[in-house]
Image (tube, grey):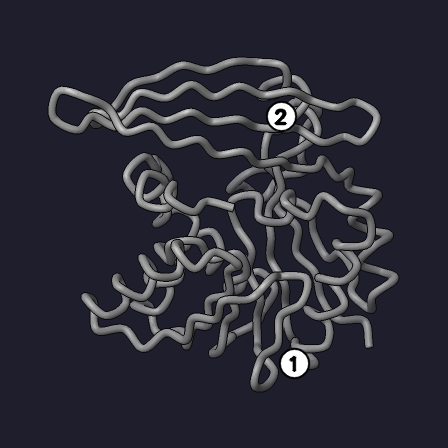
Amino acid sequence: MYGDFAKLYEELQDINYIAFADYIEAIFEKEKVSPKLVLDLACGTGTLTSILAKRGYDMIGVDMSCEMLNIAREKAYEEDLDILYLNQDMTDFELYGTVDAIICTLDGVNYLTEDGELEKMFSLAKNYLNPDGIMIFDINTEYKLSKILGNNTFVNEEKDIFYVWQNEYDEKDKICYFRLDFFEKNGESYNRYTEEQAERAYSEKEILNASRKCGLSVSKVYDELKFSPPKADTQRCFFVLRKTS
């Protein structure tokens, strides 16, 4: 996943990471926790990881893409941040000890498309969380994957990059398949990059059952960057999990 696309991903991101960091800290406050060591699963190029490190958290970033982590490490070096980055799969990661909090943002959990992967990730999260630990993650909702992204084609051009994003949603398996073709201007010609990805839609009930099976409980479910319950047309929702034992 990502490969040559890592640098384009970094250039094209239009995400308010500050708002995400503020929201995560607001959840910490509402849940009455004060984590010091935080694990960022599927951290990508480390933008959110770096922001939280600047706010005083000891950060660990885990991602399966070497290319993404190379960019993340370069950021940390340039900003003089002491962040431990590990090239590992979120369903098979190994830490040196426990952490106070685990976060996974920007639909990282949706990339767990195979049966049993969600439980594997939750089991590891439970094992590596301290007794009063907290896990916060978001998902693209089934509404977004099936109605907004699924079976649609998006065409855009920005920053000398032209791209075509074609999606197909499988109703049976609840998986949205993405094909992205990028054309990056290079003088009088274009370099072409193709990326194929897939995201699985998970219902609130599926998250609840999988987490409970692994010793975690769903404390709260919120609409995107809010503290109200998700609605029928919510496109991204956040889950807050705590250890049950």
Quadrant location of the C terminus in the rendered image: bottom right
Kindly report which numbered mark, 2 or 1, lies closer to the viewer in this rendering.
2
State yes or no: discs 2 and 1 in contact (Cβ < 8 Å): no
Residue beneath the point at 49% across and 78% down = 37
Please say if 182 is above or below 84.
above
**Looking at the image, is 208 positioned above or below residue 244?**
above
What amino acid is labelled 1 in the image? Asn
Displayed quadrant of residue 177: top right
Where is residue 57 drawn, in percent x and y?
40, 73
Residue 21 rendering spot, x and y as whole percentages: 41, 55
Res 26 visible: no
Residue 63 vs residue 205, the one in the foreground = 63
Q: At numbered mark 1, what does the secondary structure look like: helix, strand or loop?
A: strand
Q: In the picture provided, is 156 more to the left or to the right than 231?
A: left
Taking the spot 71% from the left edge, 66% from the top edge, the residue there is 242
Residue at x 62% of width, y 25% of height: 144
Q: Residues within 10 Å of mark 1 (few under 14, many from 20)?
A: some
The local secondary structure at tag 2 comes to helix
In terms of depth relative to the viewer, which is nearer, 128 or 95?
Answer: 95
The residue singled out by tag 2 in the image is 144
Residue sitting at the far bottom: 97
What residue does disc 1 label?
130
